[in-house]
Amino acid sequence: MKLYTTLPYKLREYYLNELNLYRYEYNKGNLQIAWHHLERAHILGQRYPVAHTYVHWKMLQFGFKIKSVKEVLGQITRLIFGGVKSFVGHVPVGNSGGSNVPPLKPFPIEKELLEIFEKAGVNE
C-alpha cells in the first residue's frame, strides 16, 4: 500500500492555480464559477491529505457563504474522513468533493484534468 503525503511539485502549480481562480471568481461574486474551480482543485489534490483537507475547508466556508446546511454538514463529514482516506490512498478518484455527490463514488475525470495529471507525471 502506498502512503500519500504531499502534493507532487509539478501538480502543485495546477492545484494552486485552481485555488487562485476560485478566489478571483469568489471575490467577483461569481459563485458558480468559483465553486467549479474548487471542484477542480479537489480532484487534483484529493490523493494528498493536506491539499485534500484544505479544499474541503474552503468548501465548508463556501457552504456557510451560500447558507447551505446540506453543504456545511457534508463538508464537516468530509473534513473528518477525507484527509485520512487520502493518506492511505483510498479516494474515489474524480469525485468533485461537494455534498451534491456521494462521498465515496468515483467519477470519470474530465479530459483537461487528465492532461494536467499527465503533464505533472502523476498517474490517476
Image: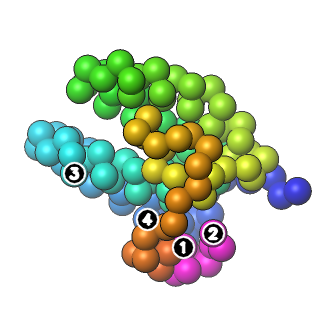
- In the rendered structure, are the residues bearing label 3 and label 1 in contact, judged by CB atoms less than 8 Å apart? no
Mark 1 nearby-residue class (10 Å; few <14, some 14–19, many ≥20): some
Question: Can you identify the residue that label 4 sits on?
Answer: 14
> Which is closer to the viewer, label 1 or label 2?
2
Disc 4 is placed on an element classified as helix
Residue that carries the numbered disc 2 in the rendered image: 124
Residue 76, position as x, y percentages in the image: 52, 23
- How far across and how far down the image is residue 66, in percent? 23, 26
**Residue that label 3 marks:** 33
Q: Is residue 119 magenta?
A: yes
Depth order, front residue of 42/9: 42
Q: Position of residue 4 (x, y in %)?
A: 74, 53
Where are the magenta residues, as a range?
117-124
Q: Secondary structure at mark 1?
A: helix
Cα–Cα span, label 3 and label 1: 22 Å
Precedes in sequence: disc 1 or disc 2: 1
User: Could you tell which of marks 3 and 4 lies nearer the N-terminus?
Assistant: 4
Q: Is residue 60 left or right of residue 21?
A: right
Q: Earlier in the sequence, mark 3 or mark 1?
A: 3
Of 40 and 20, the residue lying toward us: 40
Which residue position is annotated with label 1? 117
Q: Residue at x 57, y 25 (%)?
A: 77
Q: Residue 28: image x %, image y %?
A: 11, 43
Dominant SS in magenta: loop
Q: Amino acid at mark 1?
A: Phe
First in sequence: mark 4 or mark 2? Answer: 4
| Quadrant showing the C terminus | bottom right
Residue 8 appears in view: yes
